[in-house]
Image (cartoon, rainbow, N blue to C red):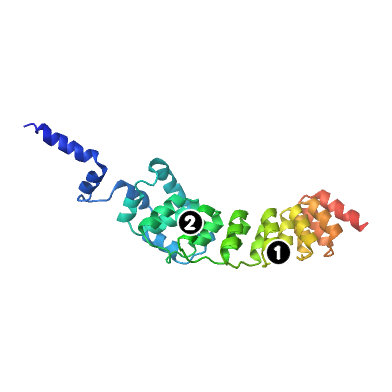
Amino acid sequence: MPFPSSMTEASAGVLRSADLFALLASYQDGVIEDVLRFRVFTEADCDRLVGGDMPTTLLPFLRSVEAALAPWYADVGTSRLHSVLRDAPPMRYMALYHAAYADRVDIAALVHAHYRMESSCDHLLDLAALRGSLATLQFLLANGYSGLTGHALDLAARQGHLDVAEHLTDHTEVVGSTRAMDGAASEGHLAVVQYLHARRSEGATVAALDGAAANGHLAIVVFLHEKRAYGATRGAIDRAALRGHLDVVRYLATRRSEGYSARTCEVALAHGHKDVYEYLLSLAS
């Protein structure tokens, strides 16, 4: 017996309405397909995010989160995120930490609009600083999220995020440590080193010049030496020789007083850096 056309039209109308279809589906067993995207993560994973782990230790896990969620966001945007988070509350933390990781301020804004989590997200702000997620960091700070620590400046500087370091200096009272300039110097971020020297008071240790020398960052070695405020050890020239950075070895040997040893020459030759070896021998002759 065929159904009356009015019933067919009514049924089709329900199926065409996203809101009515969702209401109908809510009475069925199982979960919506979108929730399955998040089900690859467990509540224990969410607990790990808010359990006090340092942002650097969370990076491998957050890379897997990015791999799982980025294609979904690319397909549907954030239009279906709220329904997922409504049905899977622990995943609210997953979405928010992923927003800080990937600088998705749109996701952070959506989560914030529906769920108040300002005081329950350890190291969320530090994570945003580590990743250089300035827009998301600004949003979180403006909306009262707490937990910013001195690690934020240290981590941002080491990663070369000058804009984040500037924002933290100008708009927060965060106090970093010597690890900020030490890390920036070792990783070759000259602009960050210059900024920290000019605007911050934490300073640096001998690890700054030693690290810059070891990694061949001559411009930073020159800057730190000329400012006369930061020392070094013999390890600077030893590690530069070990890695074959002749320009750095030449500068240190002629400008600094730490000196070098026969061991420096031997290490350079043993690692195939004959030009460094011969240069150091020429100084001794």
User: In the displayed structure, would residue 202 be above or below residue 212?
Assistant: below
Q: Position of residue 18 (x, y in %)?
A: 26, 43
For label 1, the residue is: 207
Label total for image: 2
**Considering only order in the chain, which callout, 2 or 1, is on the residue closer to the N terminus?**
2
Q: Mark 1: which amino acid? A: Ala
Q: Callout 2 environment at 10 Å: few (<14), some (14 to 19), or many (20+)?
A: some
Taking the image as shown, residue 92 lies to the left or right of residue 187, namely left
* 10 Å crowding of disc 1: few (<14), some (14-19), many (20+): many
Q: Look at the image and tell me whether residue 265 can be seen.
A: no
Query: What residue is drawn where x is 71% and y is 54%?
Result: 215
- Residue for point 22% across, 47% down: 25
| Secondary structure found at label 2 | helix
User: What distance separates the C-alpha of mark 1 from that of mark 2?
Assistant: 34 Å
- The percent coordinates of residue 151 (x first, y second) are 57, 65
User: Quarter of the image holding residue 225?
Assistant: bottom right
Near-viewer residue (5 or 209):
5
> What amino acid is labelled 2 in the image?
Phe
Q: Is residue 267 left or right of residue 114?
A: right
Q: Look at the image and tell me in which quarter the N terminus lies.
A: top left
User: Circle 2 is placed at which residue position?
Assistant: 139
Q: Position of residue 59 (x, y in %)?
A: 51, 56
Seen at 86% across and 51% down, the residue is 278
Answer with left or right where residue 166 lies relative to residue 77: right
- Please tell me in which quadrant of the rendered image residue 256 appears: bottom right
- The x, y position of residue 194, in whole percent, is 70, 57
Q: Secondary structure at mark 1?
A: helix
Query: Can you name the residue that lies furthest to the right here?
Result: 285
